[in-house]
Structure formats: structure tokens, C-alpha cells
């Protein structure tokens, strides 16, 4: 149970910056007895972090109308909290005001890609949405005919897991994009003690007890930030503009992702695999 970790580490874990490999083995062996195999590496160091305040970038219908020409026939549809504009080639949707999805069927795969031209296309695309090409975490993947770019945000080295840009582009333009972004990120509290990653791991076993599809493998555990509404189904998530993002341990398993608050050990969020 959770108290196992506290018996190993002592009543207070905040002052422990490093985790002894033998103690990690005690926890992973215990989880193994509960049919949970830790495949990924458990961090041997934790970083005490402050909480941060975040505010979403919101999009309006007017923000995406500029992607269509005045003479173009554009249809508008609405469902739940989503508005979609569809033209001859482009289809753009806004969900909950903050999730943007873009496709352009006229952008075909390219035989060769000029990276500078591709980057310029991304810069122009983002500027039309009132965004800058200034993400501090960038990953690039070469696909057949396109470059796939993943942008993320961070605060003092800690990845903010709720925001991301995924863009498929080449010299001709942007073929596909999905964007959820924070327009404002600032520190809201003092740096505070966080729990050890092995304590966070034990919550997976607790969660499995009541799960219809229990996790059997831990693929990765990382430290970062997560912004949740704090009220689960009690609030309309589409109305939430921002708030406090807390330090978390992000546990990726064979069935999804779990975010454990690194201050109070609450489960901040669950994402099912394939979401």
C-alpha cells in the first residue's frame, strides 16, 4: 500500500532529492507482486517546484475566417461545444473555444522539403492565429512528404502537459494542425517539496483495484506540470479559462496516462490510451 513507501523513505520525503536504487527496487518488486511491471526507468532525482498560473489561448470564429477567401463558399456547422468552418480545401474546427483543428487537402506530399521554407510557412500560419513560433520544447519527425512538428511549453524546465501543437507541413504549406496552448504562464507560489516518484507509482496499484482495465506495465514516469479543473464532472470544462497548474508525476502505462499531484498525492487526471 501507499504506506510502504513512507516506511521506506521516512515520514518526510521533501528533503530527499535523490532516490536510492535499492529503494526503487523494493517498490518495483512490490509492484511486480501486484502484476505491474515497471519497464521504463524510474527517475533517481526529484525537483522541488513552485505552482504556476496558466491561461488558455482562446480562438473565435473570426480568428479562422481569415483562412478562407471572400469568394469561397464556406459552410458552418455546430455540435456540442464545437464550431466548424469548411471551404473548398480547408476545414477548421474550434472545440470549447481553446482546441483548434486544421486540415488543408490541397497540401500534397512533397518529394523534397526545404526546412527554411517549411519553418516560414509555420511562422505565418501561427501568426494568423495570434501565436508566435516560440515554443521552448520542439520535436521534429520526417515523414513521407511532410515534416511533423510537436511543440510544447514548459516552466523552468518542467513540461506543461496540457498544451501542445502538432503540425504537419512542407514547402506548400500546412497540411494538418492541432493546437491547445497557454497564452500566459507565470509562477504563482514558492518552490515547495514534492513527493518521490516511487510514492506516485504506488497510486497506480491503488487505482488498479477499482479499474475494469488495470494497467500491467509502467512505460515511463516524468515530472512536470498539469492543469486540471479540480472538480472533474462538476464543472463545464468549456468555461474554464485558466487557473493553477501543479507539479505532477506523469505515469505512462499500457492503458493510458495518470497524473499524480506531487504536492498532495491526488490523482489530477487520467487519459485513456488512444485518446
Image (spheres, helix red, strand yellow):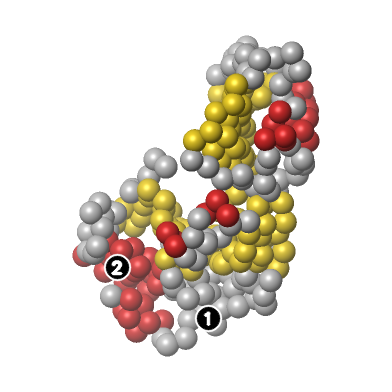
Q: Residue 167, percent across and down?
A: 62, 32
Q: Which mark is residue 14?
A: 1
Q: Residue at x 61, y 44 (%)?
A: 97
Examine the rendered structure and indicate whether residue 240 appears above or below residue 121: below
For this view, does 238 lie left or right of residue 199? right
Q: How many marks?
A: 2
Residue 114 lies in quadrant? top right
Q: Residue 65: image x %, image y %? A: 71, 28
Front residue of 247/55: it is 55
The answer to whether residue 214 is visible is yes
The percent position of residue 178, horizontal first and vertical second, equals 59, 36
The residue under the point 59% across, 64% down is 245
Decide which of 121, 80 is in the foreground and name it: 80
Nearest-to-viewer mark from 1 and 2: 2
Could you tell which of marks 1 and 2 lies nearer the N-terminus? 1
Rendered view: 88 above or below 232: above
SS at mark 1? loop
Q: Residue at x 60, y 21 (%)?
A: 75
Label 1 neighbourhood size at 10 Å, few (<14), some (14-19), many (20+)?
A: some
Query: What residue sits right under mark 2 in the picture?
Result: 206
* Residue 58 location (% of width, % of height): 67, 46
The reply to whether residue 154 is in sight is no
Quadrant for the C terminus in the image? top left
- Looking at this view, is 81 or 274 the one in front? 81
Amino acid at each position: 500500500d501507499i504506506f510502504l513507501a513512507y516506511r521506506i523513505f521516512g515520514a518526510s520525503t521533501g528533503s530527499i532529492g535523490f532516490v536510492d536504487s535499492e529503494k526503487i527496487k523494493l517498490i518495483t518488486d512490490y509492484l511486480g507482486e501486484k502484476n505491474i511491471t515497471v519497464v521504463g526507468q524510474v527517475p533517481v532525482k526529484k525537483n522541488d517546484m513552485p505552482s504556476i498560473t496558466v491561461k488558455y489561448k482562446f480562438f473565435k470564429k473570426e480568428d479562422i475566417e481569415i483562412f478562407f477567401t471572400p469568394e469561397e463558399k464556406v459552410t458552418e456547422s455546430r455540435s456540442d461545444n464545437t464550431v466548424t468552418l469548411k471551404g473548398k480545401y480547408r476545414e477548421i474546427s474550434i472545440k470549447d473555444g481553446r482546441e483548434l483543428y486544421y486540415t488543408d487537402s490541397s497540401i500534397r506530399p512533397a518529394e523534397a522539403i526545404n526546412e527554411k521554407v517549411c519553418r516560414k510557412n509555420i511562422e505565418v500560419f501561427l501568426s494568423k492565429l495570434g501565436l508566435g513560433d516560440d515554443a521552448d520544447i520542439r520535436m521534429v519527425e520526417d515523414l513521407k512528404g511532410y515534416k511533423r512538428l510537436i511543440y510544447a511549453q514548459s516552466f523552468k524546465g518542467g513540461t506543461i502537459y496540457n498544451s501542445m501543437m502538432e503540425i504537419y507541413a512542407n514547402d506548400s504549406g500546412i497540411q494538418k494542425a492541432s493546437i491547445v496552448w497557454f497564452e500566459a504562464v507565470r509562477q504563482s507560489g514558492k518552490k515547495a517539496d514534492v513527493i518521490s516518484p516511487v510514492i506516485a507509482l504506488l497510486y497506480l496499484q491503488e487505482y488498479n483495484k477499482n479499474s475494469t482495465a488495470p494497467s500491467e506495465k509502467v512505460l515511463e514516469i516524468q515530472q512536470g506540470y498539469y492543469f486540471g479543473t479540480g472538480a472533474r464532472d462538476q464543472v463545464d470544462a468549456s468555461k474554464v479559462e485558466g487557473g493553477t497548474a501543479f507539479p505532477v508525476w506523469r505515469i505512462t502505462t499500457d492503458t493510458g496516462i495518470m497524473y499524480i499531484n506531487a504536492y498532495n498525492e491526488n490523482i489530477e487526471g487520467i487519459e485513456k490510451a488512444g485518446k
